[in-house]
């Protein structure tokens, strides 16, 4: 069985490799010539653990071929996966221009029946547009079925998540097409839900909105912990033991970012607005997340009595560890807010600046190593919980910082140890009012 995958970002490349692992012959189409050249040489244009070796394996075997020629990709298979980006527009709606472009190309190149599977996260109603775009571009009327098969992978564990999904969701208005796609996953043991297109898409939006709401909820409770000297980690594990709530996505911190949560939450709110539905809970989750940055920076400003002539060292620029992705990263918002309030920023990230030498953060001093960022600084501000930040020699930091202040945006540092060394340490909901426990 042949499968084509159009768009080789995180989702597309991982999907292509998953299908290779399941034994299919895959052609993956990438229009960016630089990315294409890298992929053809077995190099990933992004960082994702575990994928490199699989990429080389399937390139060698010939089970995976990358091409820039979309017509070749379309001719190769009856099943065409669309995995292009759907970024947010300023009003929260999704930019469907890549989906439209690919749809028109599929229609124009089509010579026989195709099942077009949309894996990109698209607003409800998009399937009809895709059908129309394909139909209009066809040279003569040809049959096409539309299927949606949303992706639930997390960056940093993309491969594992794709190979061990909690569930697979397939939506189509044609049960036969849904069955064809379902059969692709016959060797996987997880539940497979087959439903209509809108329901399948809403499962994806609801999952992301629910997870983001869980985080915003625990972050809000973290503020109550701060007010009363309670411990958020114990609160989270205490409530997480209730199997109706569960232990996951209850880690309090500086808030959620990334390529999915902010975009999907904005799109869901937008879909509500378009239908006169005020999604109060989802809007609040979004608001709490935005406010979380200010919550930390109010603390910073208070501790330093203003940020003028103060240097804040930001540790971690990517939106989470083990990725070079800075889309909607809390770090960027923190930097902008520190600068807006008059502070200066030094930044360190173990991966982002190496992978993206072109990245310019105006006014920010990019540190070459961890030590370089804290020297002479007034605050060590951890934003992303890279593993190496938990192995720092805090005695050395104490000697080299100007002000011994640590803000832990992920609640991962050893609060007791830092406080006993004389640091003023603040996470969220970590008995913040108490300097020495
Ligand atoms: C998310 C969903 O988990 C995934 O199912 C979907 O397909 C895409 O969006 P991803 O954005 O890659 O995946 O990362 P995830 O691990 O979910 O983290 C998202 C954000 O939430 C990060 O900024 C992370 O730091 C934050 N987070 C996560 C918390 O602040 N607390 C938590 O308990 C969990």
Image (cartoon, rainbow, N blue to C red):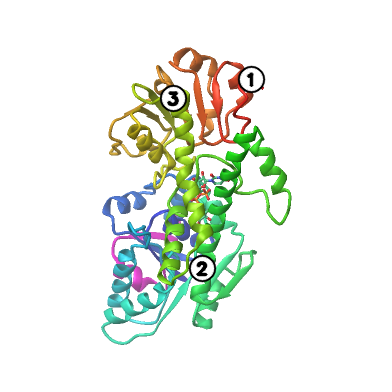
Q: Residues within 10 Å of mark 2 (few under 14, many from 20)?
A: some
Give the magenta part as a residue range.
60-81
Residue 271 image position (x, y, % from top left): 43, 67
Please give the residue where the numbered disc 3 appears in the rendered image: 370
Name the one closer to the observer, 151 or 70.
151
Q: Is ligand 1 closer than 8 angstroms to the Cβ of mark 1?
A: no
Q: Is residue 64 left or right of residue 285?
A: left
Q: Mark 2 to mark 3: distance in Å?
A: 42 Å
Q: Mark 1 to mark 3: distance in Å?
A: 26 Å
Residue 319 to residue 407: above or below: below
Residue 426 colored in magenta in the image: no
* Residue 49 visible in the shown view: yes
**Secondary element at tag 3:** helix
Q: How many marks?
A: 3
Q: Residue 79 sits in which quadrant?
A: bottom left
Please give the residue where the numbered disc 1 appears in the rendered image: 436
């Amino acid at each position: 069985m042949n499968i084509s995958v159009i768009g080789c970002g995180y989702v597309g490349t991982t999907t292509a490799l998953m299908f290779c692992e399941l034994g299919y012959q895959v052609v993956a189409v990438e229009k960016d010539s630089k990315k294409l050249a890298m992929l053809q040489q077995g190099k990933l244009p992004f960082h994702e653990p575990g994928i490199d070796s699989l990429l080389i394996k399937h390139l060698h075997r010939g089970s995976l071929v990358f091409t820039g020629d979309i017509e070749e990709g379309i001719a190769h298979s009856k099943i065409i996966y669309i995995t292009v980006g759907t970024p947010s527009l300023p009003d929260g709606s999704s930019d469907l221009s890549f989906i439209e472009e690919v749809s028109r190309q599929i229609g124009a190149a089509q010579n026989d029946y195709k099942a077009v599977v949309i894996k990109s996260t698209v607003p409800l109603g998009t399937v009809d547009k895709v059908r129309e775009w394909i139909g209009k571009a066809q040279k003569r009327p040809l049959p096409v079925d539309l299927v949606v098969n949303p992706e639930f992978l997390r960056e940093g564990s993309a491969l594992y998540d794709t190979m061990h999904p909690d569930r697979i969701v397939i939506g189509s208005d044609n049960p036969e097409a849904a069955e064809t796609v379902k059969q692709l996953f016959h060797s996987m043991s997880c539940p497979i839900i087959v439903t209509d297109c809108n329901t399948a898409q809403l499962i994806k939006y609801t999952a992301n909105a629910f997870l983001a709401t869980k985080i915003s909820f625990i972050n809000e409770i973290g503020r109550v912990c701060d007010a009363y000297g309670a411990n958020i980690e114990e609160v989270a594990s205490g409530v997480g033991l209730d199997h109706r709530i569960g232990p996951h996505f209850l880690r309090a911190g500086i808030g959620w970012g990334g390529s999915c949560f902010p975009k999907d939450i904005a799109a869901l709110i937008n879909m509500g607005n378009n239908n006169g539905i005020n999604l109060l809970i989802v809007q609040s989750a979004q608001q709490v997340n935005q406010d979380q940055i200010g919550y930390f920076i109010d603390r910073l400003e208070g501790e330093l009595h203003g940020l003028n002539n103060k240097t804040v060292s930001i540790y971690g620029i990517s939106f989470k560890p083990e990725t070079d992705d800075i889309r909607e990263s809390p770090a960027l918002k923190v930097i902008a807010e520190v600068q807006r309030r008059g502070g200066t920023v030094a930044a360190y990230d173990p991966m982002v600046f190496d992978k993206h030498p072109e990245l310019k953060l105006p006014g920010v001093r990019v540190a070459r190593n961890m030590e370089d960022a804290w020297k002479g600084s007034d605050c060590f501000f951890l934003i992303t919980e890279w593993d190496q930040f938990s192995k720092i020699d805090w005695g050395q930091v104490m000697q080299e910082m100007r002000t011994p202040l640590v803000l832990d945006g992920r609640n991962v540092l050893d609060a007791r140890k830092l406080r006993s060394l004389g640091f003023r340490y603040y996470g969220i909901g970590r008995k913040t009012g108490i300097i020495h426990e």
